[in-house]
Each structure stands twice: as C-alpha cells, then as structure tokens.
Image (cartoon, helix red, strand yellow):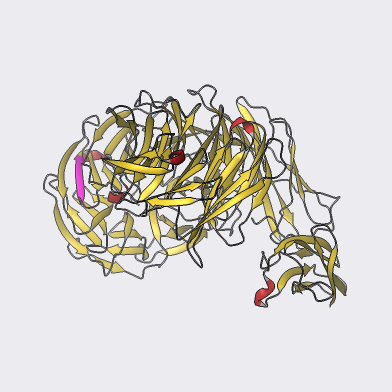
Amino acid sequence: MRVIASRRMTSSSVRRSRPLRHALLAGCLLAATAPAADALPEVVATRGLPSSISSTYGTAVPLGDPSTAGLFAISTRWGVEIRDAVSGAEAPVGAFRTSGAVNAVAADGNTLYLFAGTRGIVAVDVTDPANPAAIGSRGDLGDLKLGAASPNGYGLAAANASELHFLGRSSPGALSLLATLRYADDRIVRAIVARSDSFLVVSERSTPLQRLFLTLYRLPAGAAQPQFVSEIPVPNQAPTGMVWRGDLAFIGAGSLGILTANVRTGVVTGPAGIGKYVREVDANDSVVVAAAQAGTFVRLRRSGSGGATLINPTFESLPLEPIHIALSGSRVAISVQDVDSAQDPDEVGRGAIEFRDLDLTLAIPAVGGTGRTRRVAWSAGLAYVADYTGGLRIYRADGSDTSLVGVLPLGSSTRVVDIALDPPRHRAYLAAGSQGLQIVDTTDPSAPALLSALPLPGLASAVAVVDSDLVVVGRRGTVGAGLTFVDVTSPASPAPRGQLGSGSISDPRAIAVKDTIAFVADESLGLLAVRFGNPDAPGLVGTPTGTAARDLDLSGNVLLVATGAAGLQVVNVSNPVIPVLQSQVATPALLGVARSANSAALFLGDEGALVVDLNNPSAPVLRGPIGVPGASRDGIWVGDTLLVATGFALERFRVSPAPTVVPALTIEFDRALLLPRARIRWTPVSLPGMVGLNVYRDLLPGRQGTSPAGTLVNKSLLSPGATEAVDDSLVAGTTCRYRLEAFFADGSAIKVAEGSIFVPSNSAVGRPFPNPYRPNGGAALTLPFRIAPGSPAGTVEVTIHDASGRLVRRSVQAVGAGGGFGTAAWDGRDGRGRKAPDGVYFARVRGPGIDDARQFVLLH
C-alpha cells in the first residue's frame, strides 16, 4: 500500500519497552482564493506483503448458485477471502486487503461489496477469484455494520446504528444513494437479506417493550426510491440472525430458539427451542442449520406446509465457538472463534472456518489462521511477534522476504500479550497472561526453546528488560494486579524479587525503564513511575496521571505515552523522578506508539495509524494517516520499514528515504453561493493501477472525535480523470486541510496532493433540534443562528414550509448591531394555530448576511 508517512526513519534494534451533513455552516460573503498550502516534508510508503495472515471470519457468502457447493466469499477484519467449499483447502483461492474493519460482505454476480465501517462500501471485482480488484467505493454512509446486494444489479441496502440506506447501481462500481430511512421509534437494524428486487430487513426496538420487526421493501430496477411493501411485528423477541427462503423467513431468537415467519401472510410460528442460544441461521429447501452457543452446530429438518415446521434437531460439538454459518449446496461453512477463553478485553481468541457436508459424515478439517499478532520486537533482521494465541512467532524482517522462521507454541490456554528482547544473551521474555513470565532461548531463531516459566499472581500483561540480570513484569486482573521484579541471572530458574500490589498498580499495559525508574502505562491509573534502586523494595514516585495509558516509547529524555482518552502525551523525563508533560496531540483512542528519530507512528486499531512529527517535542505536528488492513495496535521501525502488528498479520510499510513535497491543491470559495463551499482543483493524475480518486478533509489539531482517515468529501469514488471536487460542509472559524488520494485496485492509496484554506466566521444557521420534532410534550423546535460580527441592526425572518414549499408559519425578530447568536422557535402549529400534519418541513432563515434553510421531520 502506498501511503503518506513521515520523515526518513533511522534504524532501531529492539522494541523499546514501553457529520452530520447539516452541522453548523459558515456563511461567506466574500470569495477568496486559498493561500498556497504549507509544504510539509513527507515520504511515501509502500504496503508490502504481510506475514501470517489470520482472521476473525464473518458470514460466508456463496458466489454463484447457492444451491450448488462452490466458492464462498467470507469477510475478515482486514478484507475478504475467497474459499473453496468443495475442497476446503487450507489456502484461500484469493484474498483482498483494505484499510479498517470489514464487517460484512455481499455478492452480486462477479462483484463483491465490502461493508467496511466508517470507510463505507468498497466494490471488488472477482471475475478472476484469484485476483480480486477494487473497482469503486462509497464513503458517506456512517459506520456500516450490515449490508445486502440484490442479484441482477437491482441495488444495495446497508445499515449503520440508526440508518438504513438504499443505493442504486448504475455499474458494478458506481453506487448512488437513493434513500436513507430513520425509524421513528429508534429501532436498530439487525439483519438484511436480499432476493430478486426485494429486501427483507429485521430490526429491533427495546423500549418500551421488546419487539422485532420484519419489514419488506422492493427496489425495482431503475426505481428512484424503495417501495414499502409490508411489515410484521413480533413482540418480546430479540433477533440474532435471519435467512429468507421462499415465503418463509427463519429468525434466530437467541435463547428462545428459531422463529418462522411467513413473509406473504404475516403469520409467525414458534420459536422452535433447541436448548441452546442461537447466534445465526441459514436454510435450504430441506434443512435449517444454526450456529449455537457452547460450541454447537445444529441441523433441523423442515416439514409440514411449505417446510415451516422444524423437527428432529441434531447436534454436533465443535472445538471452538460458532459465530456465523452459511450454506452452499450441501456444504456448510461455519466461522468459529474461541471467544470464551479470551482473557484480555482488547482481544479475541483463535479464529477458523469449519466445513461440513450435509450429505456425508465427512468433516473437512478447519482452515484459516489461528494467530493474533499482539506485540512486535526486532533484532538482527528478524521480527519477534508476541502472538496472543500462537506463542512466539519469528519472521524475516529485512527486504521483501516475509517468511516465517520459527515458532514456539505455548499451549492452547496461553495468551501472550507482550514481549521484550535481550539480544546479547539471545533471550525473549514473554508476558503470558495466566502462565506468567515465559523465558525463551532464541540462539537458533528457527527453533526457539522455552527455558523456563515463572508463575505470577494475576495475569502477566507487560514486560521490560532492566539489564542482563533483571526484568520487570506487569500483572493485571481483579486479583493479583501489580508489578514484579524478577532476577534472571539464571534464566532456567528465575526468582521473584520485590513487587508492588494492586494498591499501587491496577492494570499495567506497557513498561519503559530509565535509570532506576520504571514507567508504567496503566489502563486504569494512567502513567505511573516506580523507583527500584533496590529491586527488593520498589516504590511509587509521584502521583498517577489518571488518564488511561496503553503503551510507552522511551527515547533519550522523551517518553511517548499512548492514552485512551487524551491522545498522545509527550513527556520530558530528563529528571525521571519528576516527569513533565511537554505537549499533547489530540487523537482518537490509541493502542500503541512507536518512535524513530523525529517521527512517531500512532496505532489506532480499526482506524489505522497516524504519523506525528516530533522535531519539536513541545509542538508535535500531525503528518497524516496510514491506512492499515486490520486493527493496528503496535509496531516498530526497522530502518525504513514500519512493522505493524494488526492482530491479524504483521503488516509492512516500506518508507522511501527521500523526503518529497506533494503538489498543492488549488482551493477557493465558490463565488456563486452566499454560504461557503470550497471548490478543490488539481492537475490530472495518472498512476499505474489507479482506479479512482478520493478527497479527504483531514483531521485537524484539537478535533479529537474526528476519524484519523479524515472526512471523505466526495460521496463516491471519483473517476481517474477527475480534476475537481466540492466541499459544502465547512465549519466557520477553522482551517480546512484537504488531501487528494489515488485509490488502487489492491485497496491501497497514496496521497498525491494537499492544500488548506481558512474558513472565516460569518453568518450561519445551525441544525433544528430536536429532529425528528415531536411537539406533544410541549417543547418547541429550536433553530440556532449566528449573525456575523460587524453586521448592522436589522430583522431576522423565519419561515416554515412543508415539503411542497407551501408557507406554514412566519415570524420576525429584531437583531441588534454587531452580530451575535440567536434562536428561532416553532411550536408545530400553522399561522392559524392548528397542528401541522406529520411530514418533512423546511425552516428558512433570512437576515443580515444570511439566507439558508434546514430540513426536519415533524411527528405527533
């Protein structure tokens, strides 16, 4: 993947211990051309081959005729794999990686649609299943969790937490938004199934009474809007999965079993109890299969009229917990995890795919990766990975060779969460949860050998090397939390020395050592300092910061602290007894940090990574995001290569040593509009393999809630030949920084231009509140507005119009000279005092320097 990272990195030998669319808009009476963008020294990084891809698998989607066993497309947290259901081969037929978390996959002919959280929908062509290629994207639909595609190109439906989107498809990669539905009773969409030109949506409402709904929509080819067909309410049920065959829908109902609903007649029967909690279901003409709790695969025979009655359940125990299930012909694909034995709140256990054949007693062995890359360290050309469920794994880390060198399995119950290396003595120290401290001999990297294991109270969660004779181990857990210093003079028989208990240390996640001070990143207490001049009697120094800390990187006198709520903290530890906060970088919650020279990479889980310039530690500068497949949680620089532990693979980014300056975008306000709209232009871009362009409004300093990937300006992927885009969601009084990215067929991206513009603070209208507006409680609809400073005295006219434009109500209020804030209110009645009917309305505000309207919904 080609991405923008930061300045050239120097070598490091060992891992150091460690919109709403109508939000307030700014009016602009004067058009202005953007000043030249500040040229930031950047380097381009190339995404290399990963090591040991593993996955948390989602629901499998058959490619082609689902009545015939063949290929499955199955979502992974880092993209999608294409699997052969007939052979159940260990290696996937093909795979596609993309940034962020892929929550669901839908198939339409030779096109896969990946529903990728905040990154929207990615369209992938699988005409050649061995070489999937991105062909389009749509990124303005919120955090997508679910989706379905109707066959024959009718369209798509996708859902986030509160909205249901319907999209048309003019070509496989070109998606247009047709409608967005928000249910008035705040129900949440739990499942979507498509068939022909119809979509069956399962949603759930929890208050005032538990109720699920099956809502049928039609989206005929060429239709401008989805058509509501029918709805079936089912009281006192919570859906956990659904399949739709013929007239019947089978719905998982958790611990109650499986419901059967006739979509045509509205009749609901059941649930058919199986004595297990049902997670997901699928069906063909003769059976219903279910993934159920306690490691259970269930088959039920369909009988009676139309196959609506479920009888003769049979049960099969699985070694791991089934989460998802899908049928293709007689083959069943079951996605399994060992979720019940995962010990750390940030992790899941092993994942795999179990195949079964309904017509044969043969069970194909499970396939898929079983590792979870948690932490990574480096020495002498090798990367040492603390694998959460796979023990210690060692890979080649120099050049393009990413092959596995050696593995040390540590047992199915061992959870390795941190690693520290002592290269001169060829040792690796592993913090291994309930198994305590594990000491490994790495003299022969191809055959690492366990030297000893030291049981400790609680769960070993962090480890750091003090010197050749001493290491320090952090312990977490409700019982046994604390810190233990361990004498490793004889590695075959380590001996505990001094320790601190839970009264001092609560939830340690990383440790960094300077002189006789151990700095501890504590998830509960923040950054702690522990003095250990006498390792037999360590003691706290100073006061914990109180801000959840998750990782540390110590270089000289600068300690970088990755926090859960305060972003990156830059701490001066020239006097380690009195650490001094030099600066902070506001970011979303961090999981890890790695520094080399004057740059740091920040790891944000599903949101990828950010690069920060630390040339001036008192004033760090964000250089931009790195799109990382999977959930980035830790990393280390090796020369010009950034190794990232993503939970599912060891990803590699090769960083160019030559700093470059990308071309400047031309940005200006649209002179035809009263309210500001930025028009962003660039010279034509032509790069091999490019399938389109995206424009992002970047994360700005102080905007902690913003995605590090930025806000996508264009709704759909721009064509490769595009040379401009428009941003009409500007915020007054801010500097907008824009980034133009080329998007490639392999799912990677590269920044090709950037620029910025200041948005002045002028007259503006905010959003109506509440929306939807329900006047029955007596509250009024309020509409905030702002008059620009220096404006003359005058009046503000507020008019309410219905969806056809008819005037419903008018009011006028005076405003004084000098500008300022004001609020208009409406009580839901027309000019004669009558209640206005339910529907869509518009509130228009006209006054000094302002003329704008906002849409809202009225519901009695």
Q: Is residue 110 left or right of residue 326?
A: right
Q: Nearer the viewer, residue 833 or 314?
A: 314
Q: Is residue 272 visible?
A: yes
Q: Position of residue 848 (x, y in %)?
A: 86, 67
Q: Is residue 501 left or right of residue 520?
A: left
Relative vertical location of residue 701 with respect to residue 830 in this rendering, above or below: above
Determine which quarter of the picture holds residue 735: bottom right
Q: Position of residue 494 (x, y in %)?
A: 14, 50
Q: Which quadrant of the figure contains the C terminus?
A: bottom right
Relative vertical location of residue 455 with respect to residue 421 in this rendering, above or below: below
Q: Is residue 263 left or right of residue 507?
A: right
Q: Is residue 437 magenta?
A: yes
Q: How many marks?
A: 0
Q: Position of residue 682 (x, y in %)?
A: 73, 37
Q: Is residue 323 visible?
A: no
Q: Residue at x 49, y 66 (%)?
A: 209
Determine which quarter of the picture holds residue 560: bottom left
Relative vertical location of residue 483 with respect to residue 104 in this rendering, above or below: below
Give the residue at the far front of this rendering. Answer: 305
What segment carries the magenta color?
A: 433-440
Q: Is residue 635 magenta?
A: no
Q: Nearer the viewer, residue 101 or 779?
A: 779
Q: Position of residue 243 (x, y in %)?
A: 47, 42
